[in-house]
Image: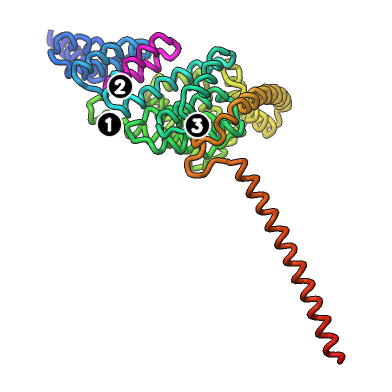
Protein backbone atom coordinates (compact mmCIF):
# COMPACT_ATOMS: atom_id res chain seq x y z
CA UNK A 1 0.00 0.00 0.00
CA UNK A 2 2.82 2.31 0.96
CA UNK A 3 4.62 1.56 -2.30
CA UNK A 4 1.45 2.34 -4.29
CA UNK A 5 1.13 5.62 -2.40
CA UNK A 6 4.70 6.57 -3.29
CA UNK A 7 4.00 5.79 -6.95
CA UNK A 8 0.81 7.89 -6.88
CA UNK A 9 2.63 10.81 -5.25
CA UNK A 10 5.46 10.51 -7.79
CA UNK A 11 3.02 10.49 -10.73
CA UNK A 12 1.16 13.46 -9.29
CA UNK A 13 4.41 15.38 -8.90
CA UNK A 14 5.49 14.45 -12.43
CA UNK A 15 2.12 15.53 -13.86
CA UNK A 16 2.33 18.81 -11.98
CA UNK A 17 5.86 19.42 -13.24
CA UNK A 18 4.86 18.71 -16.84
CA UNK A 19 1.84 20.96 -16.59
CA UNK A 20 4.02 23.72 -15.13
CA UNK A 21 6.47 23.33 -18.03
CA UNK A 22 3.56 23.48 -20.47
CA UNK A 23 2.44 26.75 -18.87
CA UNK A 24 5.91 28.20 -19.26
CA UNK A 25 6.45 27.12 -22.86
CA UNK A 26 3.21 26.07 -24.51
CA UNK A 27 2.79 25.73 -28.27
CA UNK A 28 1.80 28.74 -30.35
CA UNK A 29 -1.74 27.49 -30.93
CA UNK A 30 -2.26 26.96 -27.20
CA UNK A 31 -1.16 30.54 -26.58
CA UNK A 32 -3.42 31.84 -29.35
CA UNK A 33 -6.37 29.99 -27.78
CA UNK A 34 -5.43 31.37 -24.36
CA UNK A 35 -5.34 34.98 -25.55
CA UNK A 36 -8.45 34.56 -27.69
CA UNK A 37 -10.33 33.59 -24.53
CA UNK A 38 -8.82 36.54 -22.67
CA UNK A 39 -9.97 38.84 -25.44
CA UNK A 40 -13.60 37.98 -24.68
CA UNK A 41 -13.30 39.41 -21.17
CA UNK A 42 -11.50 42.69 -21.95
CA UNK A 43 -13.43 45.92 -21.43
CA UNK A 44 -11.15 48.54 -22.98
CA UNK A 45 -9.91 49.02 -26.54
CA UNK A 46 -6.35 49.49 -25.26
CA UNK A 47 -6.33 46.10 -23.49
CA UNK A 48 -7.93 44.45 -26.52
CA UNK A 49 -5.25 45.97 -28.75
CA UNK A 50 -2.43 44.58 -26.59
CA UNK A 51 -3.91 41.06 -26.63
CA UNK A 52 -4.67 41.23 -30.36
CA UNK A 53 -1.01 42.04 -31.00
CA UNK A 54 -0.03 38.94 -28.98
CA UNK A 55 -2.31 36.82 -31.20
CA UNK A 56 -1.07 38.56 -34.37
CA UNK A 57 2.61 37.95 -33.53
CA UNK A 58 1.95 34.29 -32.70
CA UNK A 59 -0.07 33.61 -35.86
CA UNK A 60 1.08 32.42 -39.27
CA UNK A 61 0.69 34.68 -42.31
CA UNK A 62 -2.89 33.59 -42.97
CA UNK A 63 -3.88 34.26 -39.38
CA UNK A 64 -2.15 37.63 -39.40
CA UNK A 65 -4.14 38.64 -42.46
CA UNK A 66 -7.35 38.00 -40.52
CA UNK A 67 -6.32 39.73 -37.29
CA UNK A 68 -4.78 42.75 -39.04
CA UNK A 69 -8.25 44.13 -39.85
CA UNK A 70 -9.40 43.62 -36.28
CA UNK A 71 -6.30 45.37 -34.92
CA UNK A 72 -6.82 48.31 -37.31
CA UNK A 73 -10.36 48.99 -36.14
CA UNK A 74 -9.54 48.35 -32.47
CA UNK A 75 -6.58 50.76 -32.75
CA UNK A 76 -9.03 53.35 -34.09
CA UNK A 77 -11.17 52.99 -30.96
CA UNK A 78 -8.03 53.19 -28.83
CA UNK A 79 -6.94 56.31 -30.77
CA UNK A 80 -3.62 54.66 -31.61
CA UNK A 81 -2.62 56.06 -35.00
CA UNK A 82 0.75 54.27 -35.10
CA UNK A 83 -0.93 50.88 -34.71
CA UNK A 84 -3.37 51.73 -37.50
CA UNK A 85 -0.54 52.70 -39.84
CA UNK A 86 1.34 49.53 -38.87
CA UNK A 87 -1.63 47.39 -39.84
CA UNK A 88 -2.23 49.30 -43.09
CA UNK A 89 1.34 48.47 -44.11
CA UNK A 90 0.95 44.83 -43.09
CA UNK A 91 -2.27 44.58 -45.07
CA UNK A 92 -0.47 46.10 -48.08
CA UNK A 93 2.00 43.21 -47.84
CA UNK A 94 -0.75 40.59 -47.54
CA UNK A 95 -2.94 41.98 -50.36
CA UNK A 96 -0.36 43.53 -52.72
CA UNK A 97 -1.88 41.68 -55.71
CA UNK A 98 -5.48 42.65 -54.89
CA UNK A 99 -6.14 46.07 -56.46
CA UNK A 100 -9.51 46.50 -54.74
CA UNK A 101 -7.96 46.02 -51.27
CA UNK A 102 -4.99 48.26 -52.16
CA UNK A 103 -7.40 51.01 -53.26
CA UNK A 104 -9.29 50.60 -49.97
CA UNK A 105 -6.03 50.90 -48.01
CA UNK A 106 -5.11 54.04 -49.96
CA UNK A 107 -8.49 55.57 -49.05
CA UNK A 108 -7.89 54.64 -45.41
CA UNK A 109 -4.48 56.29 -45.61
CA UNK A 110 -6.01 59.55 -46.88
CA UNK A 111 -7.83 59.81 -43.53
CA UNK A 112 -4.52 59.99 -41.61
CA UNK A 113 -4.25 63.52 -40.15
CA UNK A 114 -0.43 63.69 -40.15
CA UNK A 115 0.74 64.86 -43.60
CA UNK A 116 4.18 63.17 -43.52
CA UNK A 117 2.82 59.89 -42.12
CA UNK A 118 0.10 59.90 -44.76
CA UNK A 119 2.59 60.49 -47.59
CA UNK A 120 5.06 57.89 -46.28
CA UNK A 121 2.37 55.22 -45.88
CA UNK A 122 0.88 55.94 -49.30
CA UNK A 123 4.33 55.63 -50.90
CA UNK A 124 4.97 52.35 -49.08
CA UNK A 125 1.64 50.86 -50.24
CA UNK A 126 2.16 51.82 -53.89
CA UNK A 127 5.77 50.58 -53.85
CA UNK A 128 4.68 47.27 -52.38
CA UNK A 129 1.93 46.84 -54.98
CA UNK A 130 4.31 47.59 -57.86
CA UNK A 131 7.02 45.36 -56.42
CA UNK A 132 4.67 42.37 -56.18
CA UNK A 133 3.18 42.89 -59.65
CA UNK A 134 6.55 43.45 -61.32
CA UNK A 135 7.59 39.88 -60.49
CA UNK A 136 5.71 38.95 -63.67
CA UNK A 137 7.99 40.36 -66.42
CA UNK A 138 5.29 39.78 -69.08
CA UNK A 139 2.72 42.05 -67.44
CA UNK A 140 2.36 44.59 -70.27
CA UNK A 141 -0.55 46.31 -68.51
CA UNK A 142 1.72 47.10 -65.54
CA UNK A 143 4.48 48.39 -67.84
CA UNK A 144 2.02 50.70 -69.61
CA UNK A 145 0.65 51.95 -66.29
CA UNK A 146 4.16 52.61 -64.93
CA UNK A 147 5.28 54.51 -68.03
CA UNK A 148 2.13 56.65 -67.93
CA UNK A 149 2.60 57.37 -64.22
CA UNK A 150 6.32 58.16 -64.58
CA UNK A 151 5.82 60.66 -67.39
CA UNK A 152 2.50 62.25 -66.33
CA UNK A 153 1.70 61.74 -62.62
CA UNK A 154 4.77 63.16 -60.87
CA UNK A 155 6.35 66.56 -60.48
CA UNK A 156 9.87 66.10 -61.81
CA UNK A 157 10.80 69.61 -60.66
CA UNK A 158 9.15 69.31 -57.23
CA UNK A 159 10.71 69.02 -53.78
CA UNK A 160 8.29 66.49 -52.24
CA UNK A 161 10.64 63.71 -51.08
CA UNK A 162 7.88 61.09 -50.97
CA UNK A 163 6.78 61.89 -54.52
CA UNK A 164 10.41 61.57 -55.64
CA UNK A 165 10.77 58.23 -53.86
CA UNK A 166 7.58 56.95 -55.43
CA UNK A 167 8.73 58.05 -58.89
CA UNK A 168 12.22 56.58 -58.52
CA UNK A 169 10.78 53.27 -57.32
CA UNK A 170 8.48 53.18 -60.33
CA UNK A 171 11.40 53.83 -62.69
CA UNK A 172 13.44 51.07 -61.02
CA UNK A 173 10.57 48.61 -61.38
CA UNK A 174 9.72 49.77 -64.91
CA UNK A 175 13.30 49.15 -66.04
CA UNK A 176 13.10 45.86 -64.16
CA UNK A 177 14.93 44.73 -61.03
CA UNK A 178 16.85 42.39 -63.34
CA UNK A 179 18.21 45.45 -65.14
CA UNK A 180 21.68 46.89 -64.71
CA UNK A 181 21.76 49.80 -67.14
CA UNK A 182 23.19 53.26 -66.43
CA UNK A 183 19.80 54.89 -65.73
CA UNK A 184 18.82 52.03 -63.44
CA UNK A 185 21.98 52.52 -61.37
CA UNK A 186 21.52 56.30 -61.31
CA UNK A 187 17.96 55.89 -59.99
CA UNK A 188 19.10 53.35 -57.41
CA UNK A 189 21.81 55.74 -56.19
CA UNK A 190 19.41 58.69 -56.14
CA UNK A 191 16.93 56.63 -54.09
CA UNK A 192 19.74 55.69 -51.69
CA UNK A 193 20.57 59.38 -51.18
CA UNK A 194 16.96 60.38 -50.53
CA UNK A 195 16.21 57.48 -48.19
CA UNK A 196 18.94 58.63 -45.80
CA UNK A 197 17.15 61.97 -45.41
CA UNK A 198 14.01 60.31 -44.04
CA UNK A 199 13.32 60.32 -40.29
CA UNK A 200 13.83 57.11 -38.28
CA UNK A 201 10.05 56.67 -38.10
CA UNK A 202 10.05 55.92 -41.84
CA UNK A 203 11.86 52.60 -41.27
CA UNK A 204 9.29 50.68 -43.40
CA UNK A 205 10.37 52.64 -46.50
CA UNK A 206 14.02 52.19 -45.56
CA UNK A 207 13.57 48.44 -45.11
CA UNK A 208 11.75 48.24 -48.42
CA UNK A 209 14.60 49.94 -50.27
CA UNK A 210 17.50 48.29 -48.40
CA UNK A 211 16.05 44.88 -49.26
CA UNK A 212 15.70 45.75 -52.95
CA UNK A 213 19.19 47.30 -53.09
CA UNK A 214 20.81 44.37 -51.26
CA UNK A 215 19.26 41.94 -53.76
CA UNK A 216 20.37 44.01 -56.77
CA UNK A 217 23.93 44.43 -55.54
CA UNK A 218 24.15 40.71 -54.66
CA UNK A 219 24.02 39.74 -58.32
CA UNK A 220 27.08 38.25 -59.95
CA UNK A 221 28.33 41.49 -61.46
CA UNK A 222 26.89 43.62 -58.69
CA UNK A 223 28.58 45.34 -55.79
CA UNK A 224 28.92 42.81 -52.92
CA UNK A 225 30.36 45.43 -50.54
CA UNK A 226 27.27 47.60 -51.00
CA UNK A 227 24.97 44.58 -50.65
CA UNK A 228 26.58 43.71 -47.30
CA UNK A 229 26.33 47.35 -46.22
CA UNK A 230 22.58 47.38 -46.91
CA UNK A 231 22.03 44.10 -45.08
CA UNK A 232 23.91 45.52 -42.09
CA UNK A 233 21.54 48.50 -42.18
CA UNK A 234 18.58 46.10 -42.17
CA UNK A 235 20.00 44.25 -39.17
CA UNK A 236 20.52 47.55 -37.34
CA UNK A 237 16.89 48.51 -37.92
CA UNK A 238 15.76 45.07 -36.73
CA UNK A 239 17.74 45.55 -33.51
CA UNK A 240 16.12 48.96 -32.97
CA UNK A 241 12.65 47.54 -33.63
CA UNK A 242 13.23 44.71 -31.18
CA UNK A 243 14.11 47.21 -28.47
CA UNK A 244 11.06 49.30 -29.36
CA UNK A 245 8.73 46.30 -29.18
CA UNK A 246 10.17 45.20 -25.84
CA UNK A 247 9.17 48.61 -24.45
CA UNK A 248 5.72 48.21 -26.00
CA UNK A 249 5.38 44.75 -24.40
CA UNK A 250 5.06 42.94 -27.74
CA UNK A 251 6.80 39.94 -26.23
CA UNK A 252 6.00 37.54 -29.09
CA UNK A 253 7.27 39.75 -31.95
CA UNK A 254 10.00 37.72 -33.61
CA UNK A 255 12.49 38.78 -36.26
CA UNK A 256 14.42 35.52 -36.62
CA UNK A 257 13.30 34.97 -40.22
CA UNK A 258 14.18 38.53 -41.23
CA UNK A 259 17.62 38.20 -39.64
CA UNK A 260 18.19 34.87 -41.35
CA UNK A 261 17.42 36.30 -44.80
CA UNK A 262 19.96 39.10 -44.32
CA UNK A 263 22.64 36.79 -42.91
CA UNK A 264 22.10 34.30 -45.73
CA UNK A 265 22.39 37.02 -48.37
CA UNK A 266 25.56 38.33 -46.71
CA UNK A 267 27.04 34.81 -46.79
CA UNK A 268 26.24 34.68 -50.50
CA UNK A 269 28.58 37.66 -50.91
CA UNK A 270 31.41 35.79 -49.20
CA UNK A 271 34.04 37.16 -51.60
CA UNK A 272 33.67 40.53 -49.85
CA UNK A 273 33.88 39.04 -46.32
CA UNK A 274 36.90 38.32 -44.15
CA UNK A 275 37.38 34.83 -42.68
CA UNK A 276 36.35 36.18 -39.29
CA UNK A 277 33.18 37.75 -40.70
CA UNK A 278 32.31 34.48 -42.46
CA UNK A 279 32.52 32.53 -39.20
CA UNK A 280 30.60 35.18 -37.24
CA UNK A 281 27.76 35.16 -39.78
CA UNK A 282 27.78 31.36 -39.88
CA UNK A 283 27.49 31.24 -36.06
CA UNK A 284 24.54 33.65 -36.22
CA UNK A 285 22.80 31.51 -38.84
CA UNK A 286 23.45 28.36 -36.82
CA UNK A 287 21.95 29.98 -33.70
CA UNK A 288 18.81 30.90 -35.66
CA UNK A 289 18.64 27.38 -37.10
CA UNK A 290 18.83 25.83 -33.62
CA UNK A 291 16.13 28.00 -32.04
CA UNK A 292 13.63 28.68 -34.82
CA UNK A 293 11.72 25.90 -36.56
CA UNK A 294 10.74 28.14 -39.52
CA UNK A 295 14.39 28.97 -40.21
CA UNK A 296 15.27 25.30 -39.83
CA UNK A 297 12.63 24.25 -42.37
CA UNK A 298 13.79 26.89 -44.86
CA UNK A 299 17.45 25.92 -44.57
CA UNK A 300 16.74 22.21 -44.86
CA UNK A 301 14.46 22.73 -47.85
CA UNK A 302 16.44 25.32 -49.86
CA UNK A 303 20.03 24.84 -48.70
CA UNK A 304 21.37 28.22 -49.80
CA UNK A 305 22.98 29.08 -46.47
CA UNK A 306 24.78 25.72 -46.38
CA UNK A 307 26.01 26.04 -49.99
CA UNK A 308 27.30 29.59 -49.47
CA UNK A 309 29.20 28.63 -46.33
CA UNK A 310 30.82 25.63 -48.03
CA UNK A 311 31.97 27.91 -50.86
CA UNK A 312 33.17 30.57 -48.43
CA UNK A 313 35.31 28.00 -46.60
CA UNK A 314 36.41 26.25 -49.82
CA UNK A 315 34.76 23.00 -48.75
CA UNK A 316 34.11 22.12 -52.40
CA UNK A 317 33.23 18.45 -51.87
CA UNK A 318 30.15 19.54 -49.91
CA UNK A 319 29.53 22.69 -51.95
CA UNK A 320 29.01 20.77 -55.23
CA UNK A 321 25.98 18.67 -54.14
CA UNK A 322 24.56 21.63 -52.18
CA UNK A 323 24.73 23.94 -55.20
CA UNK A 324 23.46 21.23 -57.57
CA UNK A 325 20.42 20.72 -55.35
CA UNK A 326 19.89 24.46 -55.08
CA UNK A 327 19.84 24.90 -58.86
CA UNK A 328 16.90 22.50 -59.21
CA UNK A 329 14.64 25.29 -57.92
CA UNK A 330 12.81 26.56 -61.01
CA UNK A 331 11.55 29.72 -59.26
CA UNK A 332 14.97 31.39 -59.21
CA UNK A 333 15.76 34.31 -61.50
CA UNK A 334 18.29 34.15 -64.33
CA UNK A 335 20.63 36.31 -62.22
CA UNK A 336 20.50 33.84 -59.33
CA UNK A 337 21.11 30.84 -61.58
CA UNK A 338 23.97 32.62 -63.31
CA UNK A 339 25.64 33.35 -59.96
CA UNK A 340 25.09 29.86 -58.52
CA UNK A 341 26.41 28.20 -61.68
CA UNK A 342 29.46 30.44 -61.47
CA UNK A 343 30.01 29.13 -57.92
CA UNK A 344 29.53 25.58 -59.15
CA UNK A 345 32.11 26.10 -61.91
CA UNK A 346 34.60 27.28 -59.30
CA UNK A 347 33.89 24.32 -57.00
CA UNK A 348 33.94 21.70 -59.78
CA UNK A 349 37.22 23.03 -61.17
CA UNK A 350 38.86 22.94 -57.74
CA UNK A 351 37.54 19.41 -57.10
CA UNK A 352 38.49 18.25 -60.63
CA UNK A 353 34.85 17.22 -61.26
CA UNK A 354 34.85 17.52 -65.07
CA UNK A 355 31.24 16.42 -65.67
CA UNK A 356 29.84 18.96 -63.22
CA UNK A 357 32.20 21.61 -64.58
CA UNK A 358 30.98 21.14 -68.18
CA UNK A 359 27.31 21.04 -67.17
CA UNK A 360 27.66 24.15 -64.98
CA UNK A 361 29.50 25.98 -67.77
CA UNK A 362 26.71 25.20 -70.25
CA UNK A 363 24.07 26.41 -67.78
CA UNK A 364 26.11 29.53 -67.01
CA UNK A 365 26.26 30.44 -70.72
CA UNK A 366 22.50 29.82 -71.10
CA UNK A 367 21.54 32.15 -68.24
CA UNK A 368 24.12 34.74 -69.30
CA UNK A 369 22.40 34.83 -72.71
CA UNK A 370 19.03 35.30 -70.98
CA UNK A 371 20.46 38.23 -69.05
CA UNK A 372 21.80 39.76 -72.27
CA UNK A 373 18.25 39.62 -73.66
CA UNK A 374 16.98 41.38 -70.53
CA UNK A 375 19.61 44.07 -71.02
CA UNK A 376 18.31 44.79 -74.53
CA UNK A 377 14.79 45.30 -73.16
CA UNK A 378 16.21 47.57 -70.45
CA UNK A 379 18.13 49.65 -72.99
CA UNK A 380 14.96 50.28 -74.99
CA UNK A 381 13.11 51.37 -71.84
CA UNK A 382 16.02 53.58 -70.77
CA UNK A 383 15.96 55.37 -74.14
CA UNK A 384 12.23 56.02 -73.72
CA UNK A 385 12.75 57.58 -70.27
CA UNK A 386 16.14 59.25 -70.40
CA UNK A 387 15.13 62.30 -72.45
CA UNK A 388 12.24 62.92 -70.03
CA UNK A 389 14.25 62.93 -66.81
CA UNK A 390 17.95 63.35 -67.60
CA UNK A 391 18.04 67.11 -66.82
CA UNK A 392 15.60 67.00 -63.92
CA UNK A 393 16.69 67.48 -60.28
CA UNK A 394 15.36 63.99 -59.59
CA UNK A 395 18.71 62.31 -60.26
CA UNK A 396 20.95 65.08 -59.01
CA UNK A 397 20.95 65.80 -55.30
CA UNK A 398 24.40 67.31 -54.78
CA UNK A 399 25.43 68.10 -58.32
CA UNK A 400 24.10 70.21 -61.17
CA UNK A 401 22.14 68.43 -63.92
CA UNK A 402 23.77 67.81 -67.25
CA UNK A 403 23.21 70.74 -69.59
CA UNK A 404 24.11 69.81 -73.14
CA UNK A 405 23.99 73.42 -74.44
CA UNK A 406 26.28 74.61 -71.65
CA UNK A 407 28.63 71.71 -72.35
CA UNK A 408 28.91 72.68 -76.04
CA UNK A 409 29.59 76.32 -75.17
CA UNK A 410 32.14 75.23 -72.58
CA UNK A 411 33.93 73.07 -75.14
CA UNK A 412 34.03 75.97 -77.61
CA UNK A 413 35.50 78.20 -74.93
CA UNK A 414 38.13 75.55 -74.13
CA UNK A 415 39.02 75.28 -77.84
CA UNK A 416 39.40 79.06 -78.09
CA UNK A 417 41.68 79.09 -75.06
CA UNK A 418 43.79 76.32 -76.60
CA UNK A 419 44.18 78.31 -79.86
CA UNK A 420 45.14 81.48 -78.00
CA UNK A 421 47.57 79.55 -75.78
CA UNK A 422 49.15 77.88 -78.82
CA UNK A 423 49.53 81.23 -80.59
CA UNK A 424 51.18 82.77 -77.52
CA UNK A 425 53.53 79.79 -77.24
CA UNK A 426 54.56 80.18 -80.91
CA UNK A 427 55.16 83.91 -80.45
CA UNK A 428 57.24 83.17 -77.35
CA UNK A 429 59.36 80.66 -79.28
CA UNK A 430 59.85 83.16 -82.13
CA UNK A 431 60.84 85.86 -79.62
CA UNK A 432 63.40 83.55 -77.96
CA UNK A 433 64.89 82.53 -81.31
CA UNK A 434 65.17 86.18 -82.44
CA UNK A 435 66.64 87.19 -79.11
CA UNK A 436 69.35 84.49 -79.35
CA UNK A 437 70.16 85.43 -82.96
CA UNK A 438 70.46 89.11 -82.09
CA UNK A 439 72.74 88.27 -79.15
CA UNK A 440 74.94 86.19 -81.46
CA UNK A 441 75.19 89.03 -84.01
CA UNK A 442 76.03 91.54 -81.28
CA UNK A 443 78.80 89.32 -79.90
CA UNK A 444 80.41 88.93 -83.35
CA UNK A 445 80.53 92.67 -83.76
**Figure quadrant of residue 147:** top right
Query: Residue 72 lies in magenta, yes or no?
Result: no
In the displayed orientation, state which residue is furthest to the right: 444
Mark found first going from the N terminus, 3 or 1: 3
Relative to 277, residue 205 above or below: above
Which residue is found at the position 47% from the left and 36% from the top? 192
Relative to 42, residue 155 above or below: below
Part of the protein shown in magenta: 83-110
197 or 322, nearer to the observer: 197
**Figure quadrant of residue 445:** bottom right
17 or 86, nearer to the observer: 86
**In this orientation, does residue 261 appear?**
no
Q: Position of residue 149 (x, y in %)?
A: 50, 20
Q: Provide the secondary structure element on which disc 3 rests.
A: helix
**Disc 2 and disc 1: Cα gap in Å?**
16 Å
Answer with left or right where residue 227 lies relative to residue 100. right
Residue position marked by numbered label 2 in the rendering: 85
Q: Position of residue 319 (x, y in %)?
A: 59, 28
What is the crowding at mark 3: few (fewer than 14 residues within 10 Å), some, or many (at least 20)?
Answer: many
Which residue is found at the position 28% from the left and 26% from the top? 114
What is the crowding at mark 2: few (fewer than 14 residues within 10 Å), some, or many (at least 20)?
Answer: many
Residue position marked by numbered label 3 in the rendering: 214
Answer with left or right where residue 148 lies relative to residue 431. left
**Disc 3 and disc 2: Cα gap in Å?**
26 Å
**In this orientation, does residue 52 appear?**
yes
Q: Quadrant of the N terminus?
A: top left
Answer with left or right where residue 211 lies relative to residue 239. right
Q: Position of residue 165 (x, y in %)?
A: 44, 29
Residue position marked by numbered label 1 in the rendering: 244
Q: Position of residue 358 (x, y in %)?
A: 73, 25
Amino acid sequence: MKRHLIIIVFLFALTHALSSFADVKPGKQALIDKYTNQLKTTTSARDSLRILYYIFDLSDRRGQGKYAWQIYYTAGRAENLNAQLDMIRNLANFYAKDDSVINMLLRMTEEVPNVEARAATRTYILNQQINRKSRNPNDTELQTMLLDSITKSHNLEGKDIYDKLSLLYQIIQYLGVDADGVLFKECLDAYADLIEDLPASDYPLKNQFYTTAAMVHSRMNGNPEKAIEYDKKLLEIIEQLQQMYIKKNRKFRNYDTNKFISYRRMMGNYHALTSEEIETIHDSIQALYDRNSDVQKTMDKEGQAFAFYYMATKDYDRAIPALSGLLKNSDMSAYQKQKYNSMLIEAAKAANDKNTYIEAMEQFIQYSNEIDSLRKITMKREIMLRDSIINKPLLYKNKAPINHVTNIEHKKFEQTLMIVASALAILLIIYIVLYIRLRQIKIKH
